[in-house]
Image (cartoon, helix red, strand yellow):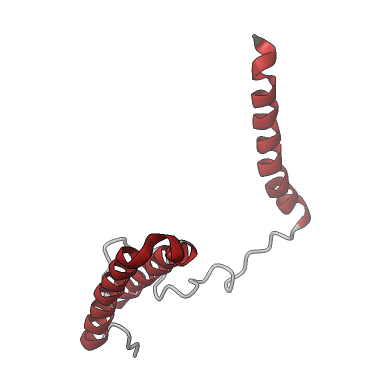
Amino acid sequence: MLELYLPVFLFVILATVLGVVPIALSYVVAPQKPDREKLSPYECGFEAFEDARTKFDVRFYLIAILFIVFDLETAFLFPWAVVFTDIGIFGFVEMVLFLVILIVGYAWAWKKGALEWE
């Protein structure tokens, strides 16, 4: 019975080694010299170690939501394009409806000024 679990055990060991060894090697080989530039915030607009209740601009949320919406659009368009010839006119109409809804959302975001960054 134990020999049935041997491949699973070897896989877990191999996965652990492949996950831990590169991280350990980076600590051994790479220089560990944090300076002010490395510890500064990177493209987020506010300091990372401030009060968690600080207010920041809502445009960060809008950009994130727009990215998710259009990323999902791409995720739906690729499989649809692959099976386009098999799904017929019904699939075409459904995708056109989906794209119309996304275009309405895009126009709304554009009208609200979510795409303009000052």
Residue at position x 42%, y 64% from top? 80
Residue 72, x across and y down, in percent? 38, 65
In terms of depth relative to the viewer, which is nearer, 39 or 25?
25
Q: Residue furthest top?
A: 1
Residue at position x 50%, y 72% from top? 42
Apparent side of residue 29 relative to residue 91 in the rendered image (left or right): right
Q: Vertical placement of 87 versus 20: above or below?
A: below
Quadrant that contains the N terminus: top right
Quadrant that contains the C terminus: bottom left
Apparent side of residue 87 relative to residue 6 in the rendered image (left or right): left
Answer whether residue 56 is visible to the viewer in this image: no
In terms of depth relative to the viewer, which is nearer, 77 or 91?
91
Q: Vertical placement of 108 versus 72: above or below?
A: below
Answer whether residue 83 is visible to the viewer in this image: yes
Residue at position x 71%, y 37% from top? 17
Please identify the quarter of the rendering in which residue 9 is found: top right
Residue 20, x across and y down, in percent? 67, 42
Residue 30, x across and y down, in percent? 74, 58
Please identify the quarter of the rendering in which residue 10 is found: top right
